[in-house]
Amino acid sequence: MEKRSNHEYYKKMKLNIHEIKELIPHRDPFLFIDTCEIIIPGEHGRSQKTFSEDEYFFKGHFPGSPIVPGVIIVEAMAQTAGVVVSYKLREFKDKSVLFMSVNKAKFRKPILPNEDVLFEVKFINRVRDVYKFWGSCFKGDTKVSEAEFSAMITYK
């Protein structure tokens, strides 16, 4: 157990692909995280992905010199935040997380086939049902990209 700043105690949760699929609607070929660690539900989490050389986007981005497209990297960060928020709101079964905006995106180094990457997201703020997060992507200890993004939670 770890201590939170508001003196609540919580336990980190590491979710596998099946548990992730219970929280967000994304499926192959558009699910870009393999595992997700919930550090603080609704606020902070990390996910992992190894982009195999067989990923569909490598055929065209770029032939002979494949790299993971930036839009996929940002989507993986957003999916991580979606899992982090959905985990906190898991008692609400009929909800959707809808990507709304991306700002301040930076891409410092390419991600190549078969590289293992870590996505980390941190809650910035919430206005009604719109959540804003900061996301970072790492290869080992090296930050390769970052972005600020927001999503809306809708209930059916």
Image: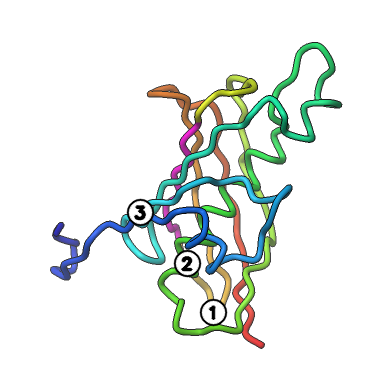
Q: Residue furthest top?
A: 64
The first of marks 1 and 3 along the sequence is 3
The range drawn in magenta is 117-124
In percent of width and height, residue 107 lies at 62, 28
Say what amino acid the circle numbered 2 marks. Val
Relative to the observer, which residue lies in front, 46 or 53? Answer: 53
- Which structural element holds mark 2? helix
- Which structural element holds mark 3? strand
In percent of width and height, residue 130 lies at 58, 71
Residue 14 - label = 3
Does residue 105 belong to the magenta stretch? no
Question: Which residue, given by chain and number where applicable, does mark 1 sit on?
Answer: 128
Q: Is residue 91 above or below residue 25?
A: below
Dots 2 and 1: beta carbons under 8 Å? Answer: no
Does residue 121 belong to the magenta stretch? yes
Q: For the residues carrying marks 3 and 2, which lies nearer the camera in this image? A: 3
Q: In this view, does 127 lie above or below 93?
A: above
Looking at the image, residue 1 sits to the left or right of residue 107; the answer is left
